[in-house]
Amino acid sequence: MLSGIQPTADSFHFGNYFGAIRQWPLMQDEHDTFYMLADMHAITVDFDPNELRERTYRSAAQLIAAGVDPERSALFVQSHVPQHAQLAWVLNCITGMGEAGRMTQFKDKSSKGGTDRASVGLFTYPMLMAADVLIYQADRVPVGEDQRQHLELTRDLAGRFNHRFGKTFIVPSPYIVKETAKILDLQDPTSKMSKSASAPNGIIELLEDPKKAAKKIRSAVTDSGDEIRFDQENKPGISNLLTIYSALTGASVAAIEKEYVGQQYGQFKVALSELVADFVGPFGERTNALLDDRAELDRILTSGAEKAKALASQTLAQVYDRLGFVL
Ligand code: AMP
Ligand code: TRP
């Protein structure tokens, strides 16, 4: 099992957490888990080096605070394992221009600054992501819905390589938890919660001040009517809050609806705001404690990279051999 996340923000938000990261610790007992900070992906768009360095540490600390256990999972930084870039080159060479050009994330991100200004790295991003997955022979990849297309490409490339050069890669499946695959913006519940597109009040960060987070929940946009009922189509605002409530408590949406029968949106939002504050408060404290010991974080990331390299180098050697590279 492999997954990755880009260290492109000071804090992860509820979308990242419920859509992806929360699944990560749950897999540690039954799978060989590899969790990666995708710093090489982070440089495909504008970035600041000092920020990137700091955010890599902050992201590592948040993943550990979220339950990723460095003893049971390999937690590492992408650029520490050179085999990712090496395999990505190979995959670039079996990907069609048209195929890569159809990736909607590239189209979205490149259209923002004009396609001519987009980097070639942004264009080849999906092949690097495919390499991240295939180099570990991962068969399951927990991500949010927006990464589905990249995983389809990963599957296509694995199949193509196997077909042309002999069975080498496991063809991986996405692991997308339907209920939380898309957490919506609190102020505009028709679009996803996103660090680049959401207004500050639309997004809850994991490292946010608990009082501020609670306030954002209380002022979340809700729909007309007053019934606390899940209805994605007609009541996207309250449905999103129900999803978050359910994800935080583990209670089913049906059970929560039942609990709040006859109550007002306001009462429900107050209850949820308290749950959210109780979650982000301790989460922030755990993260800050981890960030106070950089030497320990370095030790964890170095040891994660060692575990990762051991497996990645085996796969790469096999790939090079299949390709006819003289070994
Ligand atoms: P990003 O940093 O936005 O590329 O996202 C990192 C991870 O979080 C990916 O697996 C995304 O699919 C997931 N993710 C991001 N935003 C959301 C959201 N609003 N709802 C669910 N998952 C999300
Ligand atoms: N592209 C992913 C994102 O933006 C991050 C990522 C990089 C990733 N490599 C990966 C996710 C490999 C899963 C598997 O969220």
Image (cartoon, rainbow, N blue to C red):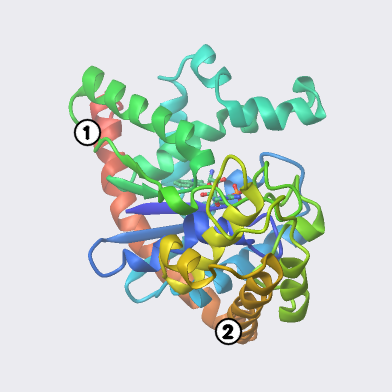
Q: Foreground residue, 237 or 35?
A: 237
**Residue that appears at 55% across and 25% down:** 103
Q: Position of residue 19 (x, y in %)?
A: 50, 54
Residue wearing tag 1:
168
Residue depicted at 67% across the width and 58% down the height = 226
SS for dot 2: helix
Residue 112: % across, % down: 78, 30
Q: Residue at x 72, y 58 (%)?
A: 203
Please, what is the three-letter code of the amino acid marked with disc 2?
Answer: Arg
How many labels sit on residues? 2
Cα–Cα span, label 2 and label 1? 41 Å
Q: Is residue 46 visible?
A: yes
Classify mark 1: helix, strand or loop.
loop
Task: Report the front residue among 124 and 27.
Answer: 27
Q: Is residue 319 left or right of residue 47?
A: left
From the top left corner, tell me how far across and down residue 60 is, in percent: 55, 68
Q: Earlier in the sequence, mark 2 or mark 1?
A: 1
Mark 2 residue crowding within 10 angstroms, few (<14) / some (14–19) / many (20+)? some
| Circle on res. 235 | none
Using a 10 Å C-alpha cutoff, classify the residue at mark 1 as few (fewer than 14 neighbours), some (14 to 19) or many (20 or more). some
Residue 72 shown left or right of residue 223 in the figure? left
Task: Locate the C terminus by quadrant.
Answer: top left
Q: Which mark is residue 286?
A: 2
Task: Nearest to the eye among marks 2 and 1: give it.
Answer: 2
Residue 144, above or below 92: below
Rendered image quadrant of residue 54: bottom right
